Amino acid sequence: MNPLTGQNMVFNLGVISTTYMTEGTFLVGDMKRDFMKMREAINVQVGYVNDDFKRNMVSILAEARLVNYIKLNDTGAFVKGTIATAITAIDKP
């Protein structure tokens, strides 16, 4: 753990915990090789829904259509696997 930022670190690399991956798996990548582009302009709508006016509230809906991609030449910059398999490969003589 980095005492200045409170972030988990492994060899000076940040570790991001998530519930989006199955337990016992990992994803390591050079995130400079990951690209995200806007497909459409951001759509923002502001208005009253149900009794918002009476309660002095406003509802805000914001939508964005994005695309996330990795160039074919950069697919080697990302590795996904299981922790048990990686430990077995490391311990193998």
Image: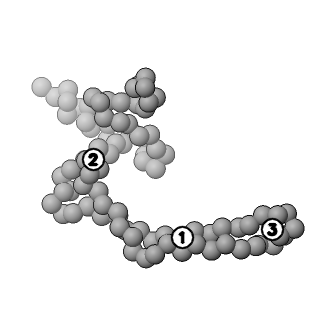
Which residue is labeled 2 in the image? 29
Instruction: Name the residue nearer the viewer: 19 or 22.
Output: 19
8 vs 13, left or right, is right
Q: Quadrant of the N terminus?
A: top left
Q: Quadrant of the C terminus?
A: top left
Q: How is the image coloured?
A: one colour
What's under tag 3, amino acid-wise? Asp
Q: Residue at x 27, y 29 (%)?
A: 11
Residue count near mark 2 (Cα–Cα under 10 Å), binned few <14, some 14–19, many ≥20: few
Image quadrant in which you'd find residue 7:
top left
- In this orientation, does residue 54 appear? yes
**Disc 2/disc 3 C-alpha distance (Å):** 45 Å
Among numbered discs 2 and 3, the one appearing first in the sequence: 2
Residue count near mark 1 (Cα–Cα under 10 Å), binned few <14, some 14–19, many ≥20: few
Which residue is labeled 3 in the image? 52
Among numbered discs 3 and 1, the one appearing first in the sequence: 3
Of badges 1 and 2, nearer the viewer stands: 1
Which residue is labeled 1 in the image? 63
**Disc 1/disc 2 C-alpha distance (Å):** 28 Å
Q: Residue at x 80, y 68 (%)?
A: 52
What's under tag 1, amino acid-wise? Glu
- In this orientation, does residue 80 appear? no
